[in-house]
Image (spheres, helix red, strand yellow):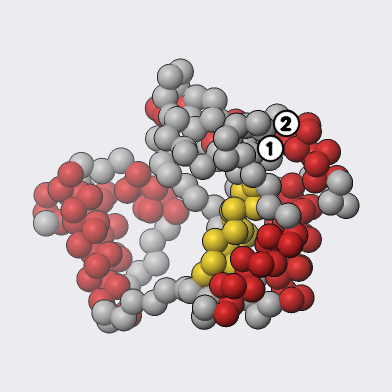
Amino acid sequence: MASECRPAIAAALERAYAGVRLSAQEACAFEHTTSSELLALLQGADTLRAQHHGDVITYSRKVFLPLTNLCRDYCGYCTFRKDPGDPGAKTMTPDEVLEVASTGASLGCREALFSLGDKPEALFPPCARSCSAMDTAAPLDYLVQMCQLVLDHTPLLPHANPGVMGPKDLARLREVSPSMGLMLETTSRRLLGTGMAHDNAPDKTRLYA
């Protein structure tokens, strides 16, 4: 299959098969692949996975905590985000967070997955003011407090997924969240165009900066 790949792709695959760590430049070569090159990449990844990890599948038992579904981005495919006043718009209270986390712990969960929209306070000042009523200045401050709440009152470990953040925010969450995540749906700049999925999603453009 590697014989059907362009030279740079074939060379990178051969180095990966040999156990060599690929450079950033080599890895970026896979951003644009043909169908046969993509298939070769997937086969290579499967071979290396089986070689180093066998057929063992691991997973984390987690409970989902949608802290707020308010978001300043309007991604065309998203059914999670809401505007204030929309049906289903919701910001969880501390009591709700603790209730869901405690129930999850009683059912054998080990992780509390916090999800929330990207910087809703930048688009919806009332959101920031409602969070201030909970002794916080912004949703991210509230997230830090809720992670600490889960740590203090349950055996669960918080996993934070608040979107794009800077170094200071990452450092703050590091103190209360053993792991953090960022979902990357695509690397296509085309989707930033007018009428496309990310044309009104300022946080998506930051991923390309």
Crowd rating for badge 2 (residues with CA inside 10 Å; few <14, some 14–19, many 20+): some
Residue in view at x 52 percent, y 78 percent: 107
Which sits in the foreground, 147 or 205? 147
Asked if 14 appears above or below 84 in the picture, the reply is below
* Residue annotated with mark 2: 124
Asked if residue 188 is positioned above or below residue 31 in the image, the reply reads above
Residue 161 falls in which quadrant of the image? bottom right
Label 1: how many Cα within 10 Å (few below 14, some 14–19, many 20+): many
Amino acid tagged 2: Phe
Relative depth, front residue between 95 and 38: 95
Residue under the image location 60 percent in, 43 percent down: 69
Residue 177 visible in the current orientation: no
- Identified at 49% across, 50% down, the residue is 183
Q: Amino acid under label 1?
A: Pro
- For label 1, the SS is helix
Q: Quadrant of the N terminus?
A: bottom left
In the rendered structure, the answer to whether residue 6 lies left or right of residue 94 reads: left
Q: Position of residue 209 (x, y in %)?
A: 58, 36
C-beta proximity under 8 Å, tags 1 and 2:
yes
The single residue placed furthest to the top in the displayed view is: 194
Q: CA distance from mark 1 to mark 2?
A: 6 Å
Task: Please give the name of the residue rendered at 25% of the width and 43% of the height, measured from the top-left corner.
Answer: 33
Residue 120 is labelled as 1
Instruction: Answer with left or right where residue 171 lies relative to residue 156.
Output: right
Position in image of residue 17 (x %, y %): 25, 69
Return the x and y of residue 129 as percentages of the image width and height.
83, 38
Return the mark for residue 2: none
Q: Secondary structure at mark 2?
A: loop
Q: Is residue 202 left or right of residue 122?
A: left
